[in-house]
């Protein structure tokens, strides 16, 4: 996921989001509301549909900042009886965070490698 770092700049929120499913027999759909483009402080609703009833899935988010540093997170969820996961309602069972956190995939992202700030000293 690409995140926005400036109040005044809009960017594409979801550059790469992966829903990992062992069975691909259904049409899995990822929805971001209100849209995939947002300001960094605007809440985004994440929903996945088309899963099997009670299916366990892992969602991964990835973002690259303006300096090329890659950040990522992941979380595992269990779909409801209708085969849907809604981050406003469904808890992460494991991963980068645990519990009901609608924006958890974003705030829990960590740098994939150590990044050191260069100083003039």
Image (spheres, helix red, strand yellow):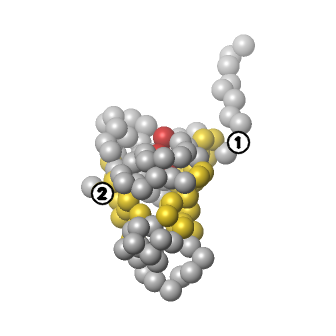
- Residue 32's x, y, as percent? 35, 59
Question: In front here: 98 or 66?
Answer: 98
- Residue 45's x, y, as percent? 34, 54
Question: In front here: 23 or 4?
Answer: 23
Q: Is residue 30 above or below residue 109?
A: below
Q: Which mark is residue 101?
A: none
* Residue 83 in view, yes or no: yes
- Distance (Cα) linking label 2 and label 1: 30 Å
Q: In screen coordinates, is 99 left or right of 113?
A: left
| C-beta proximity under 8 Å, tags 2 and 1 | no
Q: Secondary structure at mark 2?
A: strand
Q: In screen coordinates, is 56 left or right of 85?
A: right
Specify the quadrant of the image occupied by residue 47.
bottom left
* Residue 64 in view, yes or no: no
Give the residue at x 55% y 54%: 93
Between disc 2 and disc 1, whose residue precedes? 2
Q: Is residue 1 above or below residue 31?
A: above
Q: Residue furthest top?
A: 121
Of marks 2 and 1, the one in the foreground: 2
Q: How many marks?
A: 2
Question: The C terminus appears in which quarter of the rendering?
Answer: top right
Q: In screen coordinates, is 75 left or right of 36?
A: right
- Residue 12's x, y, as percent? 40, 53
Q: Which mark is residue 113?
A: 1
Question: In front here: 73 or 51?
Answer: 51
Give the residue at x 46% y 52%: 91
Q: Which residue is mark 2?
A: 33
Q: Secondary structure at mark 1?
A: loop
Give the residue at x 68% y 25%: 118
Give the residue at x 31% y 42%: 42
């Amino acid at each position: 996921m690409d995140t926005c770092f400036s109040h005044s700049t809009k960017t594409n929120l979801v550059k790469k989001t992966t829903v990992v499913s062992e069975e691909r027999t259904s049409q899995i759909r990822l929805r971001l509301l209100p849209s995939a483009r947002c300001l960094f402080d605007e809440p985004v609703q994440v929903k996945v549909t088309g899963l099997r009833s009670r299916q366990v899935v892992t969602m991964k988010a990835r973002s690259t900042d303006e300096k090329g540093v890659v950040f990522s997170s992941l979380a595992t969820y269990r779909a409801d009886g209708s085969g849907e996961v809604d981050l406003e309602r469904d808890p992460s069972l494991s991963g980068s965070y645990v519990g009901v956190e609608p924006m958890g995939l974003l705030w829990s992202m960590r740098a994939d490698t150590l990044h050191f700030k260069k100083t003039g000293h």
